[in-house]
Image (spheres, grey):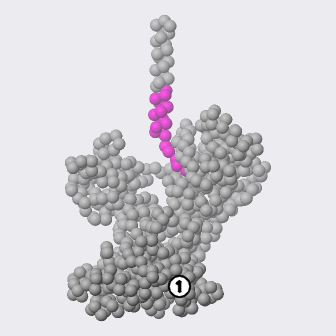
Amino acid sequence: MDNGERQGSQKTQALIAREIDAYLLRHLHKSLLRFITCGSVDDGKSTLIGRLLYDQKLIYEDQLAELEADSKRLGTQGQNIDFALLVDGLAAEREQGITIDVAYRFFSTERRKFIVADTPGHEQYTRNMVTGASTADLAVILIDARKGVLTQSRRHSFLAHLIGIRHIVLAVNKMDLVDYDQGTFESIVADYRRFADRLGVKDFIAVPISALAGDNISTRSTHTPWYHGPSLIQHLESVEVDIDAAQTQPFRMPVQWVNRPNPDFRGFSGLICAGSIALGDKIRILPSGLNSSVSRILTPDGDAHEAAAGQSVTICLADQVGCSRGDVLAAADAPPQIADQFEVTILWMAEQPMLAGRPYWLKLATQTVSATVQAPKYQINVNTMEHLAGKTLTMNAIGTANLATDRPIVFENYDVNHDLGGFILIDKLINATVAAGMLHFALRRSQNVQWQALDVSREARAIIKNQRPAVLWFTGLSGAGKSTIANLVDKKLHRMNRHTFLLDGDNIRHGLSRDLGFTDADRVENIRRVGEVARLMTDAGIIVITAFISPFSAERKMVRDMMLAGEFIEIYIDTPLAEAERRDVKGLYKKARAGQLANFTGIASAYEAPTSPDIRIDTTKLTAEQAAALIVEHLIGPI
């Protein structure tokens, strides 16, 4: 190669390098659209995503060869390519031809980058759909042209709207199977529009497509000359998403981690969920209400003068003020709200129904607190938007209820800020997510009702009684001997000049809980009420003795958590079911066996025995008198 050829080659290489750099720069600054595909089972969601990837030439030759082989072996399209197999990664999904998990895929066009979540259509996997929708800007609701708008189509539309997705695409799929009939398309669109109007969806775009054949996916199809709108990808490339909306709001950053690598550095790390912050800005730490100012902002790229919503940063403050995980850094002149009682909308996602009054963990941003939900004000019929009465929420039910937390939390209405307004509920025993919800507003009572400071402390009340307050919580099956042993303990302590009070299950049902039945929800509420009474009595310095079946571990733990450490003593009166039934002093087992007594514990309703009680009494080995003496000795020492 002579010198001229060498120089020409170098210029060509430099030109190619500049073009590559320019392409990468354009790609870097492309806007990002997050969207989901959702709808009923087998409406073609996975096939649509597979077609999008195929049309954008994002399938490598080896992947295409594997797809062709899998299509012949596992596909649903005969010898043709089954695009759904590109997305359905789980073995169970491929075998059944359905989507179970949420599958995320990234692809890009010349104009925009995309992250798409393929969400499942089966009703029992609605929770997965909510997961995918929680970060989406747009929802593609697929409708099978042969089936029209189904219940799950409406449910997914309702959830998308509820979660805050404002851009809806109605993709009427499988038009090839109805001969691209314009009337069929327009009838489905009219039906969906009537539902959308009741839902409050202001606008949506409808596109007739065939994901399998590629009609109106990347380009307009000649099979639908009567359709004059954009292809699906053209709309996705051009839809305006207000990515700057969060940055125009007041500054908010939930603290995820206190960064303390050495004694000379202390910063607060988290994701800015709203607004922007700059050096010197005044901020307020909530819920404490302490004020300070920003002395330093650190990003993954080093120190910065300012940062905005969407960035993960570490913020240093000018003052040594208390701040920990779960606190929220906010603009000092426009802080969010603080409350402990709310009206909320809940999507229940667990197989076991919601139990009003049962404590669950509530996680909102980086805050985790204990929360209880009251019986729903109403459930929502996703087909008609009608409000229905109901005492609980079952799997996939949506309802509005009041919720209370055990301490005030920092929040904003969900419509204003999804991060500080959206929450999940977690079962305390099995640590599983059971519900997702949105905070609407704080109840007025949460602001008007405050704890009243008392001059006489609980310690002073206990000292004057010369005893340590405690709750002796007897639990066990009906007929186990709880009331008998509890009564003996009460008598022994009374003879020792101890201040006691016995709360018996039957006696409470005559007064405090006379309005409650024996459903699981009513049992939970009964124990909650007894726990509150027992807590007030311990504040008065009293030794409280309770005798309740209290069948659920969660409620016994709830009462334990109400008390100070060491004050709650769980006493398991361990009597085998056969022995309790043999005794049957009240004849309840006989009635339950005859079907005359519903929800009877041990027969038709479960009893969750304590796994590690403070005291276990085996009534097949100890008499009632021996058991009572053992309990008194545990409480106050050897007699």
Q: In the rendered image, which quarter is residue 362 located in?
A: bottom left
x 50%, y 23%: residue: 16
Q: Is residue 212 above or below residue 416?
A: above
Q: Residues within 10 Å of mark 1 (few under 14, many from 20)?
A: many
Residue 567, placed above or below residue 248:
below
Residue 217 x/y as whole percent: 65, 44
- Considering only vertical position in the picture, is 520 above or below 208? below
Residue 231 is a magenta residue: no
Amino acid residing under circle 1: Ala
Which residue is at the far front?
Answer: 621
Res. 189 image quadrant:
bottom right
Residue 23 in magenta? yes
Q: Which residue is mark 1?
A: 580
In the rendering, at what x and y percent does residue 439 appear? 45, 67
Q: Secondary structure at mark 1?
A: helix
Q: Quadrant of the C terminus?
A: bottom left
The magenta-colored residue range is: 19-36
Q: Residue at x 40, y 81 (%)?
A: 473
Horizontal side of 61 relative to 438 (left or right) equals: right
Q: Position of residue 65 (x, y in %)?
A: 67, 35
Give the residue displayed 72% in from the left and 55% down from the top: 145
Foreground: 571 or 552? 571
Residue at x 47%, y 79% (from the top left corner): 574
In percent of width and height, residue 372 lies at 44, 73
As rendered, which of 209 and 49 lies closer to the eye?
49
